[in-house]
Image (cartoon, grey):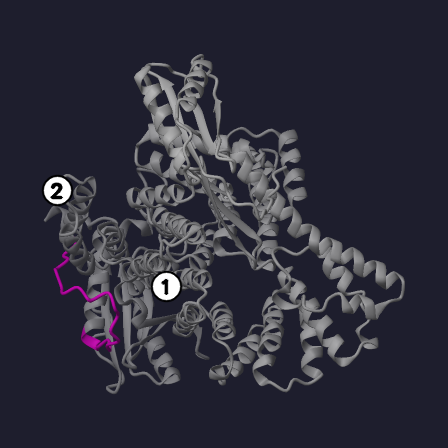
Amino acid sequence: MSTLTVSDEPALPFIRFAVSSVGEPLPPAKLTLTEQLDGSVKCAVTGDSVSTPAIAKSAAEAAERVTPIDLTLGERLVLVANSIRTRLEAEGYLVQELPSADVKVTAVFDLRTGRLIGRQETLHDFTSVDTKFAERINLSIHGALKKGPLDLATEIHRLIDLGDNLGAAAILEGRSGLGFFGVLPLELLEALQRIDVLVLSAESEKEVRISRMAVAASLNKFDDAEVDAQAILDGGIEDPAESVKFTNTIAFACFKRGEIETAIAMWTELLKSADSFSSSDRAWIWRNLANALPTPGADAIRAAHMSIDSFLEAGDKREAATSILLLSKLLEFDGPVAAVEQLNKMLDVIAANGLMADALRSSIYHSLATQLYNLRSFNPALEAAMQAASLLKGVVGAKRDLIASLSLASILAEKCSDIELSQRLNSEAISLEGDISSEKYALVRQIHALFGEFDSASAEDIRARANESGNSNLIAASEVAIAISDPSLDSTTRLRRLESVVIRLNREKASPEAKYPAMSAIVTVLRRDGKLDRAGIWLRKILAGQPLNLDARDQLLQVLWDSEAWGDAAIFTKEQIALHGNLPGILFAHGKSLLEAGDSSGALSIFMQALKKVEVGNPLRTTILEFRERALELGGVVSVVASNVDVARPIFREELIDAFHEFSNFISGEKRMVFWSRPQPQEDYKWVSHPEKRAQDLFHTFLKARFLHRISVYEELDTGAGRLDIYLKVDGGLSVIVELKMCGFGYPSNYAAAGEGQIQHYMGNRDSHLGYLLVFDARLDKNKEPLIPNMTDSSKTIYEVFVDVRPRVSEKKSKK
């Protein structure tokens, strides 16, 4: 055990040398010369070299030859040192003067979090860092900090057991608020709650309640903290600025319970007089508000900005950086550029001016690496992860963070095809795990192993240990691994287990990142069972919390394609272009969605734009060229591509009729055979089951892809005069009625022509005088021959649009 002693005696001057023989592999001998108060010089030689005895003898002889004259303290020491050095060098030894110490130790302690950050640096080449020594100091300080609150709790319990409430309250004097340091134990809160404040004076009652509130808040027990905060406010406070902390505590308790609107209202009311209280209180309220306001939203972004500025005004760079991290998350809804820019700005805020700053900058680099990794920018992500790790090398009290950064860097190095670096970083991380003897890291690896090779006995052991740890992330990870990997589970059981994980994490208000593994696993089960629509719903939930999650984005796009929801896919890819910019891959996905939905001209324009973005030799370029040719074959023409920001503009009748004709060409050229079946080769074609529904779905998909959010499509409405097939409302106010009819191969012409009468009935009910009769025409000899040449009501306009869906041509036309 190291003990620091303080003495009034003057420090004695000394000089140190490292002495070694040429070519000797062992560490050099260390020679220390200390001048005593009586003028003599004490010589000490240490070392394991075989030359050490000879060095000690030569040094002693050289010291004796110095003439004893009247010299001041220190002067004789220099003469003796020079004499010894000259003698040893003459004998062939290498002599190097050493600094006064071997190692420099610096440490910073954060009173609020109880975190100690320390670093040891060697001052010369002939010594090494004793990491165990620094770790023992760290453990000692943490032990002392933990012992203090526990001793306080024990003393309060003792006094309460004796019935001495006044004595228990008295020992809290001066300890409220920041009087409590570091991570406080639950035992202290339990002791404080035993004090009967009703028997105390008003001043003592307030002191106990403030202490109790501070401890409860530090333990995240805001319901308990609210009780004391409300009691303090009810007791009356003369200074309005003092009441801010208590009102903020109550509001936060409401927020944690899910009473979001109440919390927002309370914080908004407090900020009306923001100039009257401290910048620190103002900063916390702005951050709380940013977390509570709906996202994405300008108000939440503004609140995060205000929180950053207020924390910087208060001189709290650590919390300012945390608010910048929050702002970065909020800006993810504006795209990756804005989100990453905030992380880079955070590095500017946290200057490299100390150990705590280094630890914080490391966490920022780690966040930046994670963000870039999620965006699949692996090379810059690796650079950021390596920077995060380098800032923590040799830092005591930061091994867990260092392990996390090394592990991330190892994964990124593998993504960058640097296998040697990846293995080296992984080995370094594993060796550090052994140093700290942490159960957590071993458990993480065992959970990961379940995905590769499942063993039910091991799985149950892992689940039990995860639950014992109390770590929500480990518990969730173990449940996900078992639910996905256990071959004995059916789909319903898998979904039940996974949803229970999501529900628990929602209850704990876990981050979207923490919930993602379980939600992604639910998607996997649903897709495996062919429930694509349900999988799509969960993927949209993921993207609502993580708009830059590329894995979820790609999965949702594939789900939409697999379910042939081409219109929805076109809308989704349009949104992704607005978020990520005109990247070639997203442009291609948008163009493909448009093409499959029937908008060949829109697709062609997008493909032309994508070709300008992709370099020659990229396989994607070949694919885009193939799809461009398909668009051209379908009659697509290049049009001006709208900007990423949708500008509201009306849809005119001419644009609508052009779209109808393009839909007709698309179905005739690409989709006509989806309406037909042929049970036997010798039999004639027959309509598929419910061809009207298939036609309606194709038309709906086409309209979504062509007009995106500018059109609303209502299907099969009850008008009071039957069922209306499709009712359209478009930007600009135009209302249109559409009736779909099949004609030919069992559907007589008069059946299709009856659509005119139905449309006119619907027109009267919907107060619209514009309609379209969309005929899917399979007539062999009279294809596209008009069905309603004369309108019965001149005030109404009904367009006939024919879609050629003949499965074959007539024998008469074949002979011609």
Task: Relative to 795, say whether 542 is above or below.
Answer: above
Residue at the right extreme of this rendering: 162
The type of residue carrying mark 2 is: Val
The local crowd at label 1, few if under 14, some if 14 to 19, many if 20 or more residues have their Cα within 10 Å, is many
Asked whether residue 639 is drawn in magenta, I would say yes
Point 43% across, 37% down: residue: 100
Could you tell me residue 559's position as x and y percent?
39, 50
Point 55% across, 39% down: residue: 135
Point 58% across, 42% down: residue: 137
Task: Relative to 676, say whether 485 is above or below.
Answer: above
The residue closer to the viewer here, 167 or 223, is 167
The residue closer to the viewer here, 184 or 625, is 184
The local crowd at label 2, few if under 14, some if 14 to 19, many if 20 or more residues have their Cα within 10 Å, is few
Residue where numbered disc 1 is placed: 331
Task: Judge from the rendering whether residue 349 lies leftward or rightward of residue 73; answer left or right.
Answer: left
The type of residue carrying mark 1 is: Leu
Tag 1's secondary structure?
Answer: helix
Q: Main secondary structure of the magenta part?
A: loop
**Where does the magenta region start and end?**
634-654
Residue at the front extreme of this rendering: 70
Task: Judge from the rendering whether residue 807 lies leftward or rightward of residue 215; answer left or right.
Answer: left
Tag 2's secondary structure?
Answer: loop
Alpha carbons under labels 1 and 2: distance apart? 34 Å
Q: Earlier in the sequence, mark 1 or mark 2?
A: 1
Residue where numbered disc 2 is placed: 616
Q: Nearer the viewer, mark 1 or mark 2?
A: 1
Point 45% across, 65% down: residue: 316
Task: Relative to 627, say whether 247 is above or below.
Answer: below
Task: Judge from the rendering whether residue 136 lies leftward or rightward of residue 731; answer left or right.
Answer: right
Quadrant assignment for the N terminus: top right
